[in-house]
Amino acid sequence: MAGVVETTKTFATNEVITSTLMNNIIDETSFTEDALANSTLALTAGKMKVATSGITSNELAVDAVTANAIASNAITTAKITDANVTTAKIADANVTTAKILDANVTPAKLSQPLTRATAQNSTSGTSINFTSIPSWVKKISVMFSSVSTSGTSSLLIQIGSGSIVTTGYASGASLIGAASASSTSATNGFLITSNDTAAYLKSGLITIANMSGNSWVSSGALGLMVGGSFLSGGNLTLSGVLDQIRITTVNGTDTFDAGVINIIYE
């Protein structure tokens, strides 16, 4: 009759059972395949052992594997899939700047990266527009390279929320030359030049920064190829979040005829 164990010891008829014979039975007994309930165990010469790949997650109780049971350096990045690493698995205090390589912090990894728009040639039209500015932006740098217009109307920058705002600005600009200086103010935009002429090629940077809420201020300088510079500043509070910017002239009819304009926002 099959059983979980079998022995090679055979008793003769009327043989007396002694302690020595009983010990021999134990020594000569081995397990059979019937002793194996599943594939977790295997037999080698009648002896049980853990089968190859026999221990799976089914045999492990929840929380059975502790940190002390794992050898140092046993867990490598190759053993961890991206899907298994979630914010819920990482304590806030565990991610420090010392643990992040400088080269790993790229603009693509940031939710609010320093972004340069596409440069626009300021060689035609009465305005240069930059739209779809993200709602998180707090600072915009407007860059001018050898920009000029067809007339004498001063340059200004207008901002908007949904549409460009053309009223309510408090701004002024001054022309500082080798022999004289002059100043002008405007309410229809952030004025950035004063007593301009068609011949002036202007290069420089104007910064528009968020003061708080939807309140914005401007400041900057433009240099002239012929010598001298424009200094400017202003403020405006929008009714909503800034999402666009326009570079134009006070009269709105002079056209751009030279140069390049671009913005960087952050």
Image (cartoon, rainbow, N blue to C red):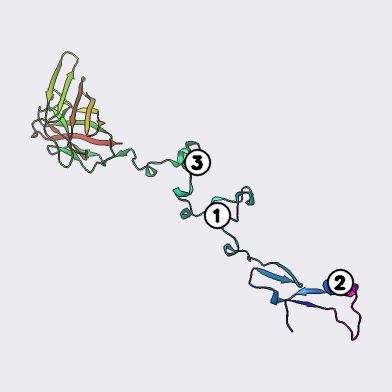
Q: Position of residue 151 (x, y in %)?
A: 9, 29
Q: Residues within 10 Å of mark 1 (few under 14, many from 20)?
A: few
Residue at left 17%, top 20%? Answer: 174
Image height of 264 relative to 198, above or below? below
Residue at left 48%, top 49%? Answer: 89
Mark 2 to mark 3 CA distance (whole Å) = 60 Å
Image height of 17 relative to 173, above or below? below
Q: Which mark is residue 131?
A: none
Furthest toward the bottom, the residue is 13
The magenta-colored residue range is 8-21
Q: Which mark is residue 23?
A: 2
**Front residue of this view, candidates 61 and 146:** 61
Mark 1 to mark 2 CA distance (whole Å) = 49 Å
Residue that mark 1 sits on: 79
Predominant secondary structure in magenta?
Answer: loop
Q: Nearer the viewer, mark 1 or mark 2?
A: 2
Q: Amino acid at mark 3?
A: Asn
Q: Position of residue 234 (x, y in %)?
A: 19, 26
Q: Amino acid at mark 1?
A: Lys
Count of all numbered marks drawn on residues in the image:
3
